[in-house]
Image: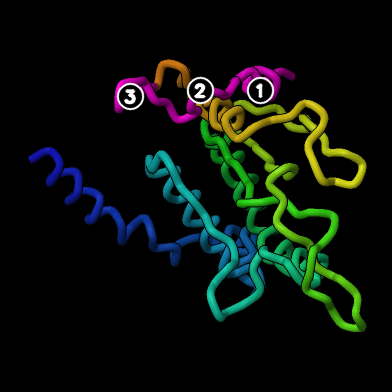
Amino acid sequence: MASYELAFKMQMSVPEVTDISKETDATRKLYGLDQPYTQEFGTQCLMARRLVENGVRFVQLYSGGKKGAEVGWDGHQECNNNHEFMSRKVDKPIAGLLADLKSRGLLESTVVLWGGDFGRTPFTDGGEGGGGKRTGRDHNPYGFSVWMAGGGIRGGKTIGATDEIGLKAEKDKVTMHDLHATLLGLMGVDHKKLTYFFQGREFRLTDVGGENDLAARLTRA
């Protein structure tokens, strides 16, 4: 009965939460809803703020990659043009989201993480562009960046660095397990205690690795 009641409450609250028609013109402009190239992702960011302020604990936004529709972030060809195009679509909405969360007192209790599935190599092993020039860059799991804001994180910190050509992480390496442990730590969860027993051993989200010392480094002034 409790599950059915929860489902009913969620369904009944959706129309009000998703109705952005009452948002002010200033708010719509803040998120870029007044511009065609930022309108789509700006709407996602505005919806994220509305979900957060209504108690939704996890929100995921997705940019680009629509099959047969437009350029995505997967820039195997003309990588600079690709990323400039995609960045233009998300930069203003993201800034608007962070500013709006902060103005409403929600940023300190909300962790915002931006990342992709891969970095980019400084070279390509195929796919020639116009004039015989190789213009693309390939997938790179050995060196890539994410950024985080909110949740008590203090801005202006850079942790880790790649080699001089941007191929592999060399300084202060942060593994995916470290990143997951850090996110859990920022939410007050000890990743080493969040385990479940399966096939004879304890499993956890960070497997047998992961250190959350980044959380302390990110939150120190």
Residue placed most toward the observer, 98 or 26? 98
Q: Which mark is residue 144?
A: none
Q: Is residue 197 magenta?
A: yes
Of label 3 and label 1, which has the lower sequence position?
3
The answer to whether residue 150 shows anywhere in this view is yes
Of label 1 and label 2, which has the lower sequence position?
2
Amino acid type at image mark 1: Leu
- Residue that lies at the very extreme toward the bottom in this rendered image: 131
Q: Where the C terminus falls, by quadrant? A: top right
Tell me if mark 3 has few (under 14), some (14-19) or many (20+) residues whose alpha carbon lies within 10 angstroms of its own. few
Amino acid type at image mark 2: Val
Residue identifier under label 1: 214
Q: Position of residue 213 (x, y in %)?
A: 64, 18
The answer to whether residue 108 shows anywhere in this view is no
Q: Nearer the viewer, mark 2 or mark 3?
A: 2
Amino acid type at image mark 3: Tyr
Q: Where the N terminus falls, by quadrant? A: top left
Q: Residue at x 61, y 26 (%)?
A: 152
Q: How far is the residue under mark 2 from the one under mark 3? A: 13 Å
Q: Residue at x 62, y 22 (%)?
A: 215
Please report the bounds of the magenta region as a residue range.
195-221
Residue identifier under label 2: 208
Residue placed most toward the observer, 7 or 62? 62
Tell me if mark 1 has few (under 14), some (14-19) or many (20+) residues whose alpha carbon lies within 10 angstroms of its own. some
The kind of secondary structure element at disc 2 is: loop
> Are the residues tagged 2 and 3 within 8 Å (C-beta)?
no
Q: How far is the residue under mark 1 from the one under mark 2? A: 17 Å
Q: Position of residue 97 (x, y in %)?
A: 60, 50
Residue identifier under label 3: 196
Q: Position of residue 60 (x, y in %)?
A: 48, 50
